[in-house]
Image: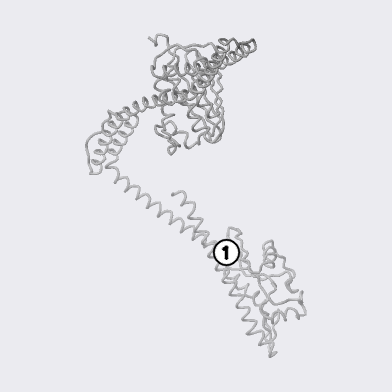
Amino acid sequence: MLAVLSFSIPMVVERNAEQHALHTALNSLKQLKLLRVYYTKNIVEKVQAYVVLAPVIKHLNETDKIPLPATMIHDLSQLFDEHGSKLNLYSPYPFPNRQHIVLDPFQQKAWLELNENPSKIISVINKENDHTVLRVAISDQMQVQTCVDCHNNHPLTPKSDWKLGDVRGVLEMSIDISSQLALANTLSLWIISCILIACTLLVIIFYFLTGKITEQVSNISQGMIDLGKGNYETEIPQYSITLEAHQMYTAFQLFKTALLERQELEKKQQLQIFETEKVNSLGRMVASIAHDVNTPIGISVTATSFLQDEIEILAKKFASGELNEEDFDFFLESSRSSITILTRNLSSAADLIRSFKQVSVDQMSEQVREVLLSEYFKEVIHSMLPKTKRAQVTVDLDCIEGRSCFIYPGFLSQVITNLIANSIIHGFAEQNNGTITLAVSAQENEVSIQYSDDGIGIADDILPKVMEPFFTTKRDEGGSGLGFSIIHNIVTQKLNGHIKLTSGVGKGLTVDISFPILKQAASS
């Protein structure tokens, strides 16, 4: 704050000094224009009416001559110059006595801009011989008809078509503002010094007021940090100089007790939720399998019924002696077709039941066993076929062939089935179809899985929260918020592995998982 104030205050004070000088110069120029109009109406017009005195350019030492209005301004400029200011009246149409004067760049610019916009104010600040000079210029317009007539009829006039309102020249005032700026700098220094002294006093007062309780607050803060890191045995000294510190100590003890109780309760709740979700997951899988098994079983029943009817017809014809070769051939063809349908549909149902049986047994037993990775992942994917088929989702598997290892297959199947279910519910919720890719590789002591989908993805502000318990964006649609939380717990606690999520809106979801391969002895 001090740095900002030290930089801004001198600028503001200096700018105010410059603006004050500018207003002073403008007021002087406006007063001169007012004086000129007054002089023209109340002196020059009366003199010309009685022909007693003549308004001319060269009036000095002439008792019967008075200065023209413009000449009066030029005379006043010499008086201004003697008192630290400089007044100029110039025009691109000067009388012969001023044709030798050359306009500088500022004067040329002032004439051009004021000729286009007479109400404009032209100003500039220049450095001249260690002095700061403010130059202000305004337009000098034809305001009185007497001036118009004089300029148009004067024998030496360089322009004879003037009209009221025309810009005939520029009034400029130059003021040395060095002393004002020096005063402004002194004022800025005083202001900054006072602020610095006030801030120093405030810091000293604050230091002494807070020094009494700093150590106690520090101890309590450190205790809170230790609690946050999981050190629930931390203690803080029980002494209090102030009532506030005693209240903070009491609050710390209450917080610690409540945290321990909450942690114990959450452990029980999470364990219960984990078991419940596992059972619910199997229940949903059973429902999906039952739904999909029902179709091939129903077709098989129909084929069996048809075959039974054909056998009855064949038996009746045989018993009556009406059976001929054509009937027998038709029966054989119908039988072959029915048996083919039976074989295909019963095989499909058997595959679904076998996949579900192995996956469900693994999930419930939570035992270590040796699995062939490629075959096991195919079984898990096959057990999810009812869900993926209804959602029009394709699951592509890229898995190392022929590699077997000891793992927890039940935990692994839970992770994969939850990921696929999550993609169907969240990733492809707004799509008619989608693709899931599973890339599985195995090193000597570790299995690596990269799971990815091409769904809608997860926003950057939500991504860090998705693995928190009960966090869901589908709460109003029945989402529990446990999917990724359970996945995270299984990977990190049950499989002793690591999990990383990468996503973005419209970029799909990528989940990188790695976990160690168990020794054969671990299965005993």
Q: Which one is in front, 405 or 380?
A: 380
Percent position of residue 216, x then y: 27, 38
- Residue furthest front as drawn: 320
- What's the amino acid at mark 1? Asp
Q: Residues within 10 Å of mark 1 (few under 14, many from 20)?
A: many
95 left or right of 397 in image: right
Q: Which one is in front, 48 or 329?
A: 329
Image quadrant assignment for residue 132: bottom right
Colour scheme used in the picture? one colour
Above or below: residue 373 compared with residue 55: above
Q: How many marks?
A: 1
Above or below: residue 388 compared with residue 179: above
**In the rendered view of the protein, which quadrant contains the C terminus?**
top left
Image quadrant assignment for residue 99: bottom right
Percent position of residue 318, x then y: 57, 10
Q: Which one is in front, 66 or 452?
A: 452
Q: Secondary structure at mark 1?
A: strand
Q: Which one is in front, 273 or 19?
A: 273
512 left or right of 51 in image: left
Q: Which residue is mark 1?
A: 176
Picture residue at 33% right of the left edge, 47% below the top:
204
Image quadrant assignment for residue 285: top left
